[in-house]
Amino acid sequence: MLKAKYMKQKFTGSRLTASGANLSRSNGRTKAGKKAKQRYPFYAICIENGEYKGSLHVGKAYSVIRPESNDPAYFWRVIDEEGEDYLYPADWFVPVELPARVKKVLARA
């Protein structure tokens, strides 16, 4: 019968290697559609409009406003062509960072 030899652990927990150090930490980015700590309103480019061809135009920037408490995840509240806010799938939009001057012009339009 073989006896198992006890080996003393050299360290506790897991050790990060130099190449993997950044892989284990958040870089602050999130995948599209996930609710993140976001400053509202922000702008997003429409990349799909489904059956809402009159309300959304592909390639146009739309204002995304703060969601209401009962809004479903993965939907954004968007001011559409009718000037009203409606919920649309977040994956229909790509958020864009605009200069402050451009944001002011779009807000007035």
Image: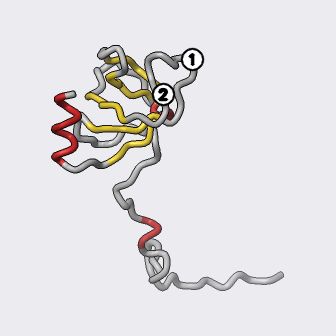
Of the image marks 1 and 2, the number of the one nearer the N terminus: 1
Quadrant of residue 51 in the image? top right
Q: Which mark is residue 10?
A: none
**Vertical position of residue 77 compared to residue 46: above or below:** above
Residue 76, how many percent across, how many down?
A: 38, 28
Which residue appears farthest toward the right when viewing the image?
1
Residue 84, how many percent across, how many down?
A: 31, 14
**Residue in the image at 17% along x and 29% along y:** 108
The residue singled out by tag 2 in the image is 89
Q: Are marks 1 and 2 in contact (CB under 8 Å)?
A: no
**Vertical position of residue 54 compared to residue 40: above or below:** above
Q: Residues within 10 Å of mark 1 (few under 14, many from 20)?
A: few
Secondary structure type for disc 1: loop
Q: Which mark is residue 51?
A: 1
Q: Give the residue type that dot 1 points to.
A: Glu
The residue mark sitting in front, 1 or 2, is 1
